[in-house]
Image: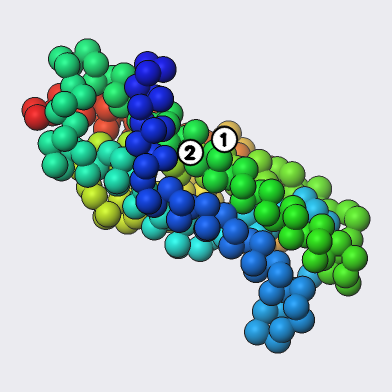
Amino acid sequence: MLMLIRAELIKLTKNKLTYFGIILSLVPFIITLLFASGSKSFLLFGKYDLLSYTNGMFSTVALGIGIFSIYFSMIINSVISSEINSDMIIYEIIGKSKRKKIFISKIISLLIFFSIILCLMLIFIILGYEFFLRNTEYAISTHDKYELGTFIYAIIYYYGLIIFISSLSFLGLGNSLVIGSFIENLLIVKLSSIVWLAPYIIGSPMDTNADTYSHNFTQFMSTQYVLLFFAVIVCLFICKHIFESRDF
């Protein structure tokens, strides 16, 4: 298994798209620099401490802007879907027993790669805040009590999205994987906003209007956690089964 993971990581280092990801991780730093420049085209609203700014920037850039979902799909497609569609993966397969190891090793290698991108992105966000915003009118020393919870959820969602897209890639969907990521995000947000559905998911009532969102934040986030976990597990199970049963 370790040899397979190592082989996949070596493939990633030789992939030109890998270096584009490093460039993308600089986006939060550049945006922060533009905020600090005082340009009327880039205005920062509100006040932030380091945690709230990191959470807001990461959630917006990594999860809210479509370019990262497109990048996820492109790199995952180049690692998995392209090999399946071109039948190159047949050279890695020796009997059905090895398909499980191939499936797991490719997903783990992608998680390692995107963890590096995540760390770089967070480092650049922190550096941007410390160098350009710390001593400005936008900086404060406190944050909302839910800030840490939303940041943890954003990180978990980041990894959940990667696993979800990686699993779908074993169906040979190609660049249309990005559609899968948008559908997953839409379904989770919409389902967690259904008032009558939440009690069946987390065992407590909730509503998602603005007032209740702030008062029942824990219930709202718990609903999204459960839905994300369910979506990832189901997708993993179905795609793994299809991959192991597929004729190459």
Query: Where is residue 95 shown, x and y percent of the image?
Result: 15, 15
- Picture quarter with the N terminus: top left
Instruction: Give me the residue at 67% from left, 79% from top.
Output: 42
Query: Where is residue 110 shown, x and y percent of the image?
Result: 42, 36
Q: Earlier in the sequence, mark 2 or mark 1?
A: 2
The residue at the far bottom in this view is 40
Query: Where is residue 207 shown, x and y percent of the image?
Result: 61, 53
| Lateral position of residue 30 relative to residue 52, left or right | left
Q: Answer with the quarter of the image where residue 176 lies.
A: bottom left
Task: Classify mark 1: residues with Cα within 10 Å, few (<14), some (14-19) or many (20+).
Answer: some
Q: Which residue is mark 1?
A: 202
Per the rendering, the mark at residue 113 is 2
Per the rendering, the mark at residue 236 is none
Task: Classify mark 2: residues with Cα within 10 Å, few (<14), some (14-19) or many (20+).
Answer: some
Instruction: Give me the residue at 57% from left, 35% from top.
Output: 202
- Picture quarter with the C terminus: top left
